[in-house]
Structure formats: structure tokens, C-alpha cells
Image: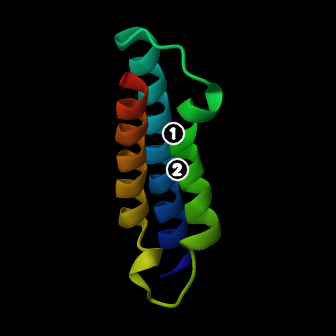
Amino acid sequence: MNISADVAADLRVAAVAAGCTVALSLVLRYGLGIAASPLLRLSPIAVYFGYLFLGKGSTGSAFENPRLWMVLTAVVTVATGAYLAT
């Protein structure tokens, strides 16, 4: 990958993490009326930091695929929401 493709991939993963964080916070607060701790509401951002530290490289591993991290962010968001809704 070239530098512009790396930057675009980073921006896509960051956008998904930010969007999921905002959506989770809004759904919990206004949709479900749940006052959750900030750490739980920021859980999608943790996946982004995992991507920055673990998912970037040039080994060709499937673990380095930005789509994997975007899906993982969505899964963590839904799992956190389900956990807090119960």
C-alpha cells in the first residue's frame, strides 16, 4: 500500500469508531435512557487504538485488513449496547 491508501484506511477506521461511539452514546442516553459510564461508552474507540498498535504493518496478514477492524468496531458497539440494555 502507498501512503495515501494508508491514510485513507486510517481515516475510514477512525470514522467508523467515531460514528459508533456517538451512536452508542446517543442510543444509550436518549433511546434507552441508560446512564452508562464513560469507559463503556468509549469502547468503540478502544478498538481503533488496537488497530493503530496491532493492525498496521506490511506483513500481508489478514489481521492488518482495515475492514476487519471496522467490523470489529461495529461488533464491540452492538455487544456493549446489548450488555448495557440487559
Instruction: Give the residue type at disc 2.
Output: Ala
Q: Residues within 10 Å of mark 2 (few under 14, many from 20)?
A: many
The residue at the far bottom in this view is: 59
Circle 1 sits on which residue?
Answer: 18
Q: Secondary structure at mark 2?
A: helix
Q: Toward the viewer: 5 or 21? A: 21
The x, y position of residue 54, in whole percent, is 59, 72
* Real-space Cα separation, disc 2 to disc 1, in angstroms: 6 Å
Judged left or right of residue 37, residue 10 is left
Q: Toward the viewer: 30 or 86? A: 86
16 vs 61: above or below = above
Report the residue at 54% width, 87% height from top.
Answer: 58
Q: How many marks?
A: 2
The x, y position of residue 16, in whole percent, is 43, 46
Report the residue at 53% width, 60% height from top.
Answer: 10
38 vs 64: above or below = above
Q: Residues within 10 Å of mark 1 (few under 14, many from 20)?
A: some
Callout 2 touching callout 1 (CB < 8 Å)? yes
Report the residue at 46% width, 13% height from top.
Answer: 34
Q: Secondary structure at mark 1?
A: helix
Instruction: Give the residue type at disc 1.
Output: Ala
Report the residue at 47% width, 76% height from top.
Answer: 64
Q: Name the image quarter holding the C terminus.
A: top left
The type of colouring in the image is rainbow
The x, y position of residue 53, in whole percent, is 65, 68
Which label sits on residue 84?
none
30 vs 15: above or below = above
Circle 2 sits on which residue?
Answer: 14
11 vs 1: above or below = above
